[in-house]
Image: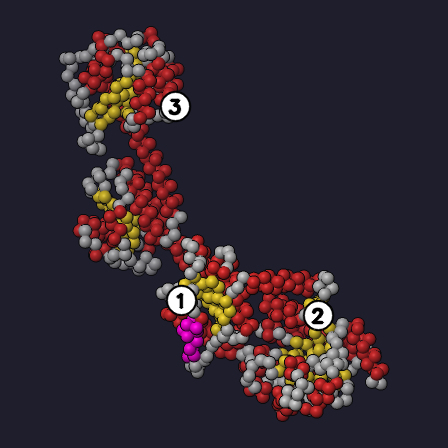
Amino acid sequence: MSQGSNDFMFEDEAEMQFIEDNDEADDSQAVWRILVVDDDADVHLATEHALAGVDLLGRMPEFLHAYSAVEGLAILKNTPNIAVILLDVVMETQDAGLKLVDQIRHELKLTIPRIILRTGQPGYAPELDAIRKYDINDYKTKNDLTRNKLFTAVLTAIRAYDQMMRMEIYRQGLEQIVQGSSDLMVQTGLQAFSSGVIQQLSAVLGVDPEGVLCAQADLDHDCASNEYIVIAAAGRYQGLIQHQLDEIDDVQIRESLKLCFQKRSHLFEKHYAVLNFALRGNKQFAVYVKSRQLPSDIDRNLLEVFCKNVSICADNINLISHLKDSAYLDKLVGLPNRAAFIDAIDNCINNNLFSEYSVVLIDVDRFAEINNAFGHSYGDELLVECAKRLEESFGIDSLIARLSGDAFGMLGKSATLIPAQIRAAIQRPFAIGDTVEHSVSFSMGIVRLKDSHGKGQAVLKDANIARKLSKQAGSGSEVFYAPEMSSDAKERTHLLQHLHGAFGNGRLHPAFQPQVDLLTGKLLGFEALMRWRNEQNELIPPDKFIPLAEQSGLIIGMGTWILRDSLHFIRQLELEGWHDLTMSVNVSAVQFRKTDFLDILQAALHDTQANPKMLELEITESVAMMGQNLVETTLRKIRAMGIAIAIDDFGTGFSSLSYLDRLPLDRLKIDRSFVTSICENADSGRITDMIIQLGRSLGLRVIAEGVEHQEQAERLLAMGCSEAQGYFYARPMPAAELKTWLLDWKIKHSL
């Protein structure tokens, strides 16, 4: 136990003059909290009397009193910012003070408060090891603590505490800046970033998040600008966002921001601060915040570090914004792109708006043909004009995006995106450049979000399913998506996967159907047809897998393969004595568009050593109209090689017949749909008869496909058709089976 106050002596003759060691007093109201822990009440009174009214580094002391180690621990748990603890060693027990030191440092984790041990019983003084172990600032016997010595000990402890606190504040400030910079970097866009700057700056200064951030206008350009706009504000100033600096009616805010911009430096006043942030390209922005007092040196250093970090972050945010614009904007038409459109659908779904909204997928019918006919520049201008019309008519209420080549997407309320109104907006004739007005039709696939399942990518996939079906329905059609369509699409996808495997593993094979002279019965040649038997030995109809091959581009490889195989076979027949026969091979529009198509033809002829006169290429009417100048030029080059050209499925495609007189053609092929009906009644063959007469008047041979019985053959011959193929003569056969058929044919016709 302590011996009492008689051991605590004063030097009355030594009247102390206390000097203010620090000019930078934080606040006249600020105090140093000193906790006295001693079981002797006289010690408490003597200590407080000795230091009462003493200026300690610009602050007055505030005393807290505990009369046991237990009371001291309770006060330390509940009272922050205790600077010095004057602690008796011997209280409840002989080592109660040392145990309390251990609790302060290890249990409460209070490492900054300074501890001065005092004892009235020198025999109970702690060993040096204990002083080192417990981080004790000083140790005094009570009879050593005269007023001067007590002042010196406490002042030394407070000075150490102050320095440690400043270091801790600086450390925490740096951590806050690093964390704040990380938080700011995840913001998307300069406005969100700027709001974050106000929040972080307020935290550094320890004030409420209220302020104004004003940025130099035209941040995306290199030229300097003297115009400034508020891009972020918080608290009471939120109404200033997007206002020009000169529109701010608070004179202090307006003038201090202007001065900060002019000086390009920070301004610190007693009740506010304006920080300047220098950016790349001679740009800058400034933040005005209210403050309670002038910042200390430490605060200013922290703010300088903060400003440099924020400037770097702002430059990076600008860079990220540019990159994001590039990633989410279509440069040709200036609309959001596919990625942005998918994100918008996701947001719509996440906000539970799917019951009201729809997605419309629009594309230009026969856009590739338009490109080929008028050139790519015309096609680009057409897309730009389409985008402009959609944006002008629907851009206020809906999101318009360009998703791919000629495909546009619309996201908006179902009540707004009505197909007839969309067509009215974009289907007027286009007058582009020096060309005459050109009418364009559009196909649409429409998905009500409530009918689709999944996120944006899945919705767009469903819209594409509907769009493809609208294409199949004919130009200018629209189809609303229904869930059962996905099953059909999955079936086609499954089929396409198997088709890839079949082509790679040799399960596709050519079948050859004979073509004959209707009048003489002479064998003229064959048409090469593609056949596919799956792994279950089931024959897959061509009308199921050929369109898939064309859509996927697989037809290019398949077409080259069947061309070579067919030429090899006809050449082999020639070597076996079958002369003057031809091989007709179908050419898809996808193949014909390939720039190296002529090279592929020449290579196939060269490698098989087949005579070009043995080959006839069958093209559809859609190929013939696929950019007339290009088609005419290419076909003339093909004819110059000695290869014949036929129009397949004539009468089922374009209504314009002008190309027949201009293109270098050899034969017209009447589609089986016309042949099937020619014997139904007296009037049923009129279209077939018209096609035959048209072909003959143009000097073209005419062949009818799908002839299945003798009556059809006789009717065709009476109409003037000279050639035919069909089941009445022979089914399509693999090469080995065809060779057997040829021998039988030879015997039957005594050839």
Check if residue 184 falls in the magenta segment.
Answer: no
Point 29% across, 42% down: residue: 202
Q: Is residue 121 above or below residue 369?
A: above
Point 54% across, 65% down: residue: 465
Name the residue type under label 3: Glu
Point 34% across, 15% down: residue: 97
Using the image, tell me which numbered label, if any, was put on residue 531. Answer: 2
Q: Is residue 169 above or below residue 481?
A: above
Q: Is residue 235 left or right of residue 425?
A: left
Name the residue type under label 1: Thr
| Closer to the camera in the image, 133 or 520 | 520
Which tag, 2 or 1, sits closer to the chain's start?
Answer: 1
Residue 279 visible somewhere in the drawing: yes
Which tag, 1 or 3, sits closer to the chain's start?
Answer: 3
Crowdedness near tag 3: few (<14), some (14–19) or many (≥20) residues, C-alpha within 10 Å: few
Q: Is residue 47 left or right of residue 174?
A: left
Q: Would you name the residue on which mark 3 appears?
A: 107
Residue 5 horizontal/vertical position (percent): 22, 10
Q: Secondary structure at mark 1?
A: loop
Q: Nearer the viewer, mark 2 or mark 1?
A: 1
Residue 75 horizontal/vertical position (percent): 30, 22
Q: Would you name the residue on which mark 1 appears?
A: 416
Q: CA distance from mark 1 to mark 3?
A: 67 Å
Q: Secondary structure at mark 3?
A: helix
Q: Which residues are magenta?
A: 420-432
Using the image, tell me which numbered label, if any, was put on residue 100. Answer: none
Which tag, 2 or 3, sits closer to the chain's start?
Answer: 3
Residue 199 horizontal/vertical position (percent): 31, 44
Q: Nearer the viewer, mark 1 or mark 3?
A: 1
Check if residue 427 falls in the magenta segment.
Answer: yes
